[in-house]
Image (spheres, helix red, strand yellow):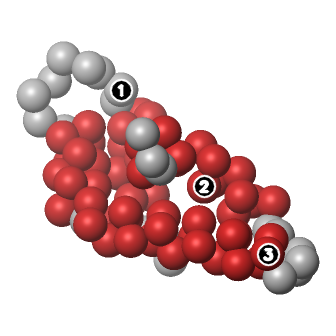
Amino acid sequence: MRSLYDQLSDRLAAEPSHTRRNGPRQDIGMLLFAQRDDIAALWKAAEASLLSDAEAGGEVDDGLRAAVERLRPLFGER
């Protein structure tokens, strides 16, 4: 089963026009805007989980760490 995000992302890849007023670019923007607080909460939870695992000396998931670091400029401290 594919997510709504995956469907819009595929449509955006198929028609990447930056000049169209309507279409997948606008749809994905509205989707992400509508869920912005949930996305920020998810990032904070992921960062806290990584810090907790690191402090406990546990194994840290490399994929999660990489995703958190890519999003740090947007969600991390300024």
- Residues under numbered marks 3 and 2 in contact, where contact means CB atoms less than 8 Å apart: no
Q: Nearer the viewer, residue 58 or 37?
A: 58
Q: Is 32 rendered above or below residue 16?
A: below
Residue 39 found in image quarter: bottom left
What residue type is disc 2 on? Val
The extreme top residue here reads 19
Left or right: where does residue 40 sit relative to residue 50? left
Q: Amino acid at mark 3?
A: Glu
Q: Nearer the viewer, mark 3 or mark 2?
A: 3
Frontmost residue, 20 versus 47: 47
Residue tagged 1: 16
Q: Quadrant of the C terminus?
A: top left
Residue 47 locus on image (x, y percent): 59, 66
The residue carrying mark 3 is 55
Q: Earlier in the sequence, mark 1 or mark 3?
A: 1
In the rendered structure, which amino acid carries the disc numbered 1?
Pro
Would you say 7 lies left or right of 36 here?
right
Q: Is residue 61 above or below residue 6?
A: below
Which residue: 79% across, 75% down?
Answer: 55
Residue 17: quarter of image:
top left
Tell me which label, 3 or 2, sits earlier in the chain. Answer: 3
Question: Label 2: few (<14), some or many (≥20) within 10 Å?
Answer: some
Residue at (51% x, 75% y) in the render: 45
